Amino acid sequence: MATTTATTRPAVRARPQSRRGGFLRERGWLLLGVAFIAVYCLAPFYWMIVSSLKANPLLDRALFPKNPTLVNYQEVFSGENNFQYALRNSVIVAGLTTVVALLIGVFAAYALARLQFRSKKLVLGAVLATAMFPLIALLTPLFQLFSNLGLIDTYPPMIITDISFTLPLAIYVLTSFFSEMPWELEMAAKVDGATPGQAFRKVIVPIAAPGVFTSAIIVFIAAWNEFLIAYTMTQTLASQPVTVAIAKFTGVSRFEQPFGTIMAAGVLVTIPLVILVLLFQRRIVAGLTAGGVKG
Amino acid sequence: MPRRLGKLGLVGAVVALVLAACGGPNEGGGSSGGGAQGTGPITFVAGKDTSGKYPKVIEKWNAAHPNEKVSMIELPEAADAQRSGFVTNLQAKSDKYDVLGIDVVWTAEFAKSGWLVELDQSQFQLAQMLKPAVDTGMFEGKLWAVPYDTNGGLLFYRKDILDKAGKKPPTTFDELKALCPLAKQNNIDCYAGQFFKYEGLTVNFAEAVQAAGGEIMTDNGTKVALGAPAVQGLSVLADGFKQGEIPKQAITYKEQESQRAFVSGKLMFLRNWPYVYALAAKDEPANKVRGKFGVAPLPGISGPGSSSLGGLNFAVSAYSKKQKTAIEFVKFATNQENAKEMVLLTGNAPAWTDLYNDPELVKKYAHLPILLEGLQQAKPRPVTPYYQEVTSAIQEDAYAALQGQKSPDQAVTDLTTKLNEIAQGG
Amino acid sequence: MTVATETVHPARVRRGGPARTSEGRRAEARLAFRLLIPTGIVLAVIIAYPVVRAIWLSLYSDARFGTPEFVGIRNYLRAFTGTGSGVFWQAFWFTTLLTLVTMAFELVVGFGMALIMNKAFRGRGLVRASVLVPWAIPTAVSAKLWEWNFQPDGVVNQIFRLDVIWTGSHWPSFWAIVIADVWKTAPFIALLVLAGLQIIPNEVYEAARVDGATALQSFWRITLPLVKSAVIVAVLFRMLDVLRIFDLPFILTNGANQTETLSTIAYKEAIQNLHPSYGSTLSTITFAYIIVAAFLVNWIAKADVVKTAERGVK
């Protein structure tokens, strides 16, 4: 990246640009693109929200609820479903998974990106290979393992298993980030008189932030969304996360699925994630501008 | 360095192999030794539902047995998820599940796998229960599970349309199809059941075969009995699709979608379980058939209609350490008094024959006598330990026939071959 | 950045860090080993053990009510050419086609979203948050949402005035699965590509613009090569996921109309039919297939993910 500006430039060709016209056109395209993104991403979510506000979403197909009601949301937290426990469980499991997976992942990624050793390819290949096995086949042996350890219906089986299947991706993303980072800046800072601690905090951390936060989001959402492991390893609300709790929502009979309640739960589960990401993404941007990018 | 990494790899491999060796099939959490006489607090595991029937019976028991309290573990309501929940636990020989609320079609499989405790028939008043329901808990002449409730298909129909035309509800499919022009006049679809590729399709297929006087399998699942009746039954449904008496979207129908079509007034005849009764009688704006519908026994083809048997049975896990308490609870929860309470709450069909004439129940649920009629003719789906494979095969071929991809003849032939293979030993 | 490197003595900052003596190399290798131990343990216990067990199981027969016996590769032959081959090959081709089509769409949509999100404008944060919505919705909920949307009387038919029975035949089912999957996971690609885009400093584009490059040339010559590794990671992992796709076909069609995927058949054998050996066989075949596919992607993209990781960006 540093070298591009060092190459000799060809003779500057003055290109008469109608600056304002081009600017507006670009803005126009941008707006269109943004509109597309918004509709693409949010339309089904809008439908989810709307359905969750209808008393009988299956029979009432209006695009906007005529008599919006919160009865589905009440149902979600009612004594029948006790969703708040599931939410608590999900937060704990996904949170711990993210913290531990990132810790382990950062160590591994640093080794892979910055240190020299043979068999690096083998390690990366092996890490990648572990992400390739179909989860279904792992369920029964893992259940037996944790059952023998008496850990069924507790957090550890979910956390450990979630870590193991998000780790490969985290390591890959982090490794690819760490290898693109301008590590020279750390050197530069030290040469400029910073202590190793200062160099790390003021230079490395801000630049590593985008990669680390991106991985954190990926791992968190993967753990949050996980169903099969959670379903196999848990039995009661003591440890069941939201994915399993939602699967257990039931209607007046075993043949009826309470769509309104399921959609309500879906909305409840998505919004905190989005807020979380909104918080983090500011950090990502801050990391870029605060770091040595502008020199 | 390679040595280091090699060591790491070796350690990993050794760990993996050791664990693999230890995790053999005989490792498990439970033992069976003292289980048979064990007493104490137990767990009751069944699919969740919102009617409140389980909490009621558990409360009563707990009040009378403070040292042997029952706590409920709920499984998702979807049958598939429930089964995998049971299977995972039972395969690991875990002692965490004591009393199991299992679907009627799982008895043979669970019994043959050695997961259930054989029950003493003399302890349960089986003679006072509907024979088809009791049969779903038996396998190889032994009792493995006791009926908690049962279930049979019903024909829901638009009474208002039939009355206006001066017609009575059909008793055969031919009569039903003859009434379809009425549906067309009213701009609605004629008939639907459950035809998506899932367990409900097996139910509808079985009912079609039975309506033609046939059976699917006999002799504890060792003989395949499909033949001309099966072809006839399947043809009635396949032709229904081809000729439009069954709307083409019905190929995606499960219980919920078909019920929805009927309750929103878009269907004249519906084959479904009794739970639809309460929904069709509900007072809410989306319900277009309130007061306009009736219930009849299933139509036949060359004989009377015969419903497939549904329902829930209670069994005791072979790995439970408190089997004595568990069996007592099963006896309690399935007794007549509690069965009556269950019916009052849910409108589900009880296994106790007397309850169908109970005035209090009939007053609330007018469909009970009609249900009884149907249940006495009902037959269970194939009783075989390989039920999962059997139902998969049935779904494959029946679905293909309904879509017109195979002729009913071809479908039944293919299915017979597959079922024979499965009966040989999966 | 350019300023910084120019002030540093070039000899001290070589690619990959300070000069390494052989003693330094060994120390480095030791450190690397130690840093990798936690990873090794977690992956060995949770993944390696079940995988080894599964492969071991696949060499035995399934005897539900008897004792399994060693049969070598018979299960594999059954899948490839024997009684299971009809189902297996259908699942194989369907999974492959699904992967190719879904990945193509995801890449285009995801990349486009990333490019748009990268531009500086107000409300950018909100756009980014909304992009994450599809991905943040739990798969269980999203699968049910799409199951419902694709019903004959569902909202998709309603809005586009169609009369398609989506889950009633092969190609509509295929597109239903593609649409539902792309919707949910294009944000994943968008996020990874965006992170890669953000590392490219603006000066590079400025310099190119001053040199007279058009937007397209900028994109082709600057953007693409620089985000290549981020894109490869995204593509690779998405591909691993799609090849193992389970929820959507299971919930939308239950494998009807020849929409079985490798994972649905493995599940049905292992969990429904309780044939752990044959189920493990199918899983192992899927595993091998994915490894081959990963190699192919690596080779086709002429990317050596490891090399890129090692050498940094040129």
Image (cartoon, rainbow, N blue to C red):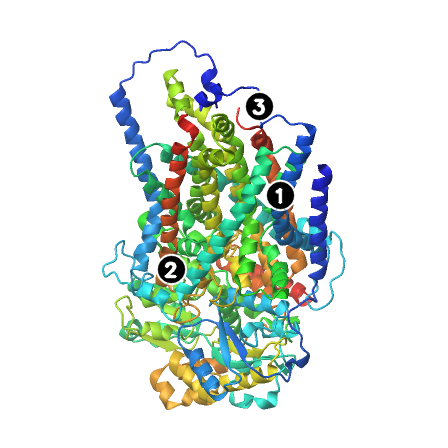
Horizontal side of residue B217 vs A265, given as left or right: right
Mark-to-mark CA distance, 1 and 2: 39 Å
Nearer to me, A165 or A293: A293
Which amino acid lies under the numbered mark 3 shown in the image of this protein?
Answer: Arg
- Judging by the rendered image, the residue that carries numbered circle 1 is C36
Mark-to-mark CA distance, 1 and 3: 25 Å
Dot 2: element = helix
Nearer to me, C229 or B183: C229
Nearer to me, A183 or B13: A183
CB contact under 8 Å: marks 1 and 2: no
Dot 1: element = helix
Mark 2 Cα shell of 10 Å, populated few (<14), some (14-19), many (≥20): many
Q: Position of residue B35 (x, y in %)?
A: 64, 80
Q: Quadrant of the N terminus of chain C?
A: top left
Which amino acid lies under the numbered mark 2 shown in the image of this protein?
Answer: Ala
Dot 3: element = loop
**B112 in relation to C213, above or below:** below
Q: Position of residue C257 (x, y in %)?
A: 51, 53
- Chain at tag 2: A
- Chain at tag 3: C
Horizontal side of residue C256 vs A260, given as left or right: right
- Judging by the rendered image, the residue that carries numbered circle 2 is A265
Mark 1 Cα shell of 10 Å, populated few (<14), some (14-19), many (≥20): many
At x 61%, y 51%, the residue is: C42
At x 53%, y 50%, the residue is: A100
